Amino acid sequence: MAEYTLHPATSQHGDTVQCQAAAEEAGHAGQMLRCHDGLVHAVIRREGSGTLTYEEALQAGRIGLWRAISGYDPGRGTAFSTYAWVAIRRHIRRAAAQATGDLECGLIPTPLLQAPDLAGHVERVLIHEALHTLLSQLPERLQRVILARYGLDGDPSRSLRQLGAQLGLSHERIRQLEQDALAWLRHPAHSLLLRQRLGKNTVADYRQALADNASLRQARRGRSR
């Protein structure tokens, strides 16, 4: 991935251009990770995961996918899927070998030693993509409330009263809209991808989400009587 180093003498316009370039590149990488995540699963199914669990192999494979995205050169004439397949398989095998102690520390390449940080970054990118994909499906007003309340629109998070004043609504109405949005977002029918990214997709998690929504409906019925 390209690095963007700011110099004290750089103009404000130059800073803006560099920041936009970095944001565009990060967005492209996130889109590539999302689009090609199925390739990681395919490698694991076809090539196996050695002594790793499926989740461990998935994490290692996503690191390989990230590095493939970073290093791919279409000018070489190799299809991205072919290039990425090799990178994904290599990182899974290295992780499996490291887990069983087959690789001595001195023989492990430096990039592999940095894998935990990279893995965390890849996971954050995938979670960010899944979250914003989910939020984009909300009705516009509910989406606006959630983005503002949790500071997901690039500005500091706003209180119920601040957001109510901004939208011309009471703080109680903003609270109701927030609850409606959260109920929709946590429903298992809508939140599968994000739950998978967060590891919150067990039967117990789904039951809890449905119970929370049922409690909200019951509380509202009680207040309306």
Image (spheres, grey):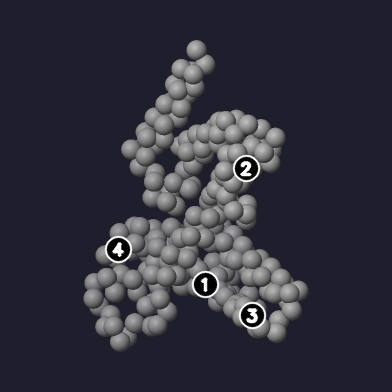
Residue 4, percent across and down?
62, 78
- Of circles 2 and 4, which is in front? 2
Q: Circle 1 is placed at which residue position? A: 68
Q: Quadrant of residue 70?
A: bottom right
Q: Is the N terminus in the top left, top right, bottom left or bottom right quadrant?
A: bottom right
Disc assigned to residue 52 = 4
> Which of the marked residues, 2 or 4, is nearer the chain's N terminus?
4
Q: Marks 2 and 4: CB-CB under 8 Å?
A: no
Query: Callout 4 environment at 10 Å: few (<14), some (14 to 19), or many (20+)?
Result: some
Q: Circle 3 is placed at which residue position? A: 6
Q: Circle 2 is placed at which residue position? A: 162
- Of circles 1 and 3, which is in front? 3
Tell me if residue 76 can be seen.
no
Compared across the picture, whether 125 is left or right of 45 comes to right
Tell me the residue at 65%/83% (across/down): 7
Tell me the residue at 57%/49% (across/down): 157
For the residue marked with disc 4, what is the amino acid? Leu
Residue 91, percent across and down?
40, 72
Compared across the picture, whether 38 is left or right of 54 comes to right
Compared across the picture, whether 101 is left or right of 81 comes to left
Q: CA distance from mark 1 to mark 3?
A: 26 Å
